[in-house]
Image (cartoon, grey):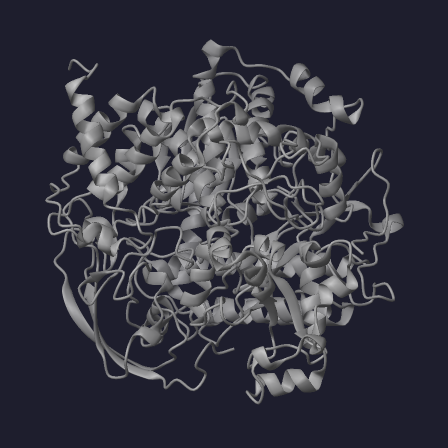
Amino acid sequence: MKLESKIPEGPLAEKWDKHKFNVKLVNPANKRKYDVIVVGTGLAGASAAASLAELGYNVKAFSFHDSPRRAHSIAAQGGINAAKNYQNDGDSVYRLFYDTVKGGDYRAREANVYRLAQVSVNIIDQCVAQGVPFAREYGGLLANRSFGGAQVSRTFYARGQTGQQLLLGAYSALSRQIAYGKVKMYTRTEMLDLVIVDGQARGIITRNLITGEIQQHAAHAVVLATGGYGNVFYLSTNAKYSNATAAWRAHKKGALFANPCFTQIHPTCIPVSGDYQSKLTLMSESLRNDGRVWVPRTKEMAERLRTGQVRVADIPEEERDYFLERKYPAFGNLVPRDVASRNAKMMCDEGRGVGTTGLAVFLDFADSIKRNGAAWVDAKYGNLFAMYEKITGENPYEVPMRIYPAVHYTMGGLWVDYNLQTTIPGLYATGECNFSDHGANRLGASALMQGLADGYFVIPYTIGDYLAQTAPKPVTTEHPAFNEAEANVRAQIQKLLSINGTRTPDDFHKALGHIMWEKCGMARSAEGLQQAKAEIQKLRREFWQDLKVVGTGEELNQTLEKAARVADFIELGELMVDDAYHRNESCGGHFREEYQTPEGEALRDDEHFAYVAAWEYQGENSPELLHKEDLVFENVKLTQRSYK
Amino acid sequence: MAGSNPNAKPLNLTLKVWRQKNRNTNGQMVDYQVRDISQEMSFLEMLDVLNEDLLRKGEEPVAFDHDCREGICGSCNLFINGRAHGPEPGTTTCQLHMRKFNDGDTITIEPWRAEAFPVNKDLSVDRSAFDRIIQAGGYVSVNTGGVPDANEIPIPKSIADQAFDAATCIGCGACVAACKNASAMLFVSAKVSQLALLPQGQVERKQRVENMVAQMDKEGFGACTNIGSCAAECPVGISLENIAILNREFLAAKATSNNLA
């Protein structure tokens, strides 16, 4: 298989415009003859479903939630980037493009990222027109704030709830199309397989989560907008239901999976408090604008603090190490996420961590409160402070927050070409579900940007190119491939219900998460990854021998749902380990201990690894086949990232 | 790491939980004991412990809705000790922590109770009525593309802030559960206010409120009798003032309606 990225010819700044002119169009009267399935209705899915329906296509949209408004996009706090240059501080499409490619440690496609920066400005316009209440200045114009990895202020926000407001905007556009009958919405319905007819994606198999009914759905094209796979780690900032099942099953049907080991560990999360911990909560990166990150200067002081012999307030200024400000004077507390996370881990590894477990660093607002007043801090971060207090029982106005890195986002995903089409014709992937724009590390406030860019402004053009080359004949589920896929889905459900072992799905999931976090998390080594692979394979065997699920498949059965997702997480976890093992370099979120600079920074190997690793499924128990898409940098010079 | 009080004593609790097989069967309260519950746990983590125990014993775990567990998705919806989302004000069920309870407590856990929210199973209810109300008009009818530059619509900060406050509704349904009439007025008013306040919402202002209220009535929600339990129990602090705005918007729309049907 040759990977064709289909990046248009010509200068960077003209590629997208030229491409839009060159793609084939579907005549307006013919659009209603095409059916498109959209799986997932978060930012990427809801925006795509609404926009495609507005164009006239018939859309069937699927969500496993009870409402499209619940997708995990809703939890994004900090903001959305756009190259508006409203602040007159030197921003431009080119600068956003440059920051994103650099922030991604030069493992993203230039052309995709440039397009993302171009359409970023349209997203803000669109959202405002929908009534999204972004923060404003007293003059009535839009406000911005700064985010990690950038030296301009280009992040639009709605207090600490930007994702919520953007998702409700997309949800409202989707709701309008549902009311018009252009979108048929299936809630509490989970995709369990992809159906391929004559080499093209032609439909999906779903399970109704309330009744257990298995259904077949046919369409001319399928868009997966099913989010990321951070929950492979069990503990992450993802929602509990976020899963990889739709993407993974498409992968097993032939869609290549790209850069699975590129996972983002977010530096500012509330630390783990016990074994019962069910998820981790992010504290927005925007807090690093005003909070200062520190640990005690010495191990001894940290030890005294952990054991309660000294209080935080009693540690004098000269005994505090503001390590990000010390090591990276240019960016200070606003270094990119991977750098901030790794440094927090380093401090804790040195024995200078805080809290009873020593797995935390301080994020301190004392200076900001002194300088600006508590009311100012409250107006900016009030909801985040309240959330922190609810979870920890501590008041961050009085004692510094304790934070620790946690799995947050997955840059890897289904491989897509410039049109966001996977290696299966007619199957598209948008948002976090694909791999395309963030390279090895995503910058803050760029996930919302990408999800909406794909859904509002990319897929409506590129899917038309495919559909225009497909006959506008009705599609049905008559082809035997539908019954075959349905039989496989039923067989798997039956198998999960019949093992009748002793361990719960959560038990296996926690075991997997532990392996992944320890050996394929913030720091990885060849040795650890080899161990991880063996451990995951063993876990997988145990899963299929000792799983316990009760109840039936013909009812709401949350344990059964969970079991099927964990089965997929285990397989995907192994691929992540393989990918991390093969990539003999450090880049962005992928830090291999063997490859670092003398200062402990990630050491890339551009000569051998400036490519996208796209893996092809080869059947159960066979190693996946690696394909490489070389990354060509014509506009950005590859350098060692420096935020010093 | 434990939070403020690492020495807090683990709790032993009695839970009275609503169990109901599906929409078409009757349910009942069932007693469970949970032991050694850390005070640092969230309420849902405590239920996770119960469910893992049940599963290991071969019994069916308690079905409940939840997802983000950070108070924003609006999925979780438990009626705890007779209160929507439990005893702590301004808090969703997932953000409620066990440090708010005492050793030996008996805790009753029920689903939202409203005719418009039928029970799916145990504590999970069907809130699709809310979606249908939004579909009736809770949007600004703009297609993708062709919109003006964002800064061509200046909005006074105070108005933007007020609209934002209304827009933070998470659609959990606590307002309905808390109301003795199972009225959805607070939910509807939040969306109506947000869009009535903003310039973008003016064009469809009248038909929006008319259509949304009509759908609300059709779904079987009760009338508002101005008690205010909804706002008192709202986990995100949607203000009762929004209902006043909704009433004003509705009257004004009806009095000058373009809708002749």
x then y, percent, for residue B147: 50, 20
Picture quadrant of residue A578: bottom right
Q: Residue at x 50, y 53 (%)?
A: A376
x then y, percent, for residue B113: 16, 54
x then y, percent, for residue A447: 58, 44
x then y, percent, for residue A167: 45, 40
User: Is residue A635 left or right of A29 when viewed as pictured?
Assistant: right
User: Is residue A616 left or right of A186 when viewed as pictured?
Assistant: right
Q: Is residue B127 visible?
A: yes
Q: Image height check: is A605 above or below A350?
A: above
Q: Image height check: is A134 above or below A237?
A: above
Total numbered labels: 0
User: Residue furthest toward the right?
Assistant: A607
For the C terminus of chain B, the quadrant is top left
Q: Is residue A219 visible?
A: no
Given residues B181 and A634, the one toward you in this image is B181
User: Is residue A23 left or right of A40 when viewed as pictured?
Assistant: right
Picture quadrant of residue A88: top right
Q: Image height check: is A555 above or below A513?
A: above
Given residues A457 and B190, the one toward you in this image is B190
Given residues A519 and A473, the one toward you in this image is A519
Q: Residue at x 85, y 52 (%)?
A: A640
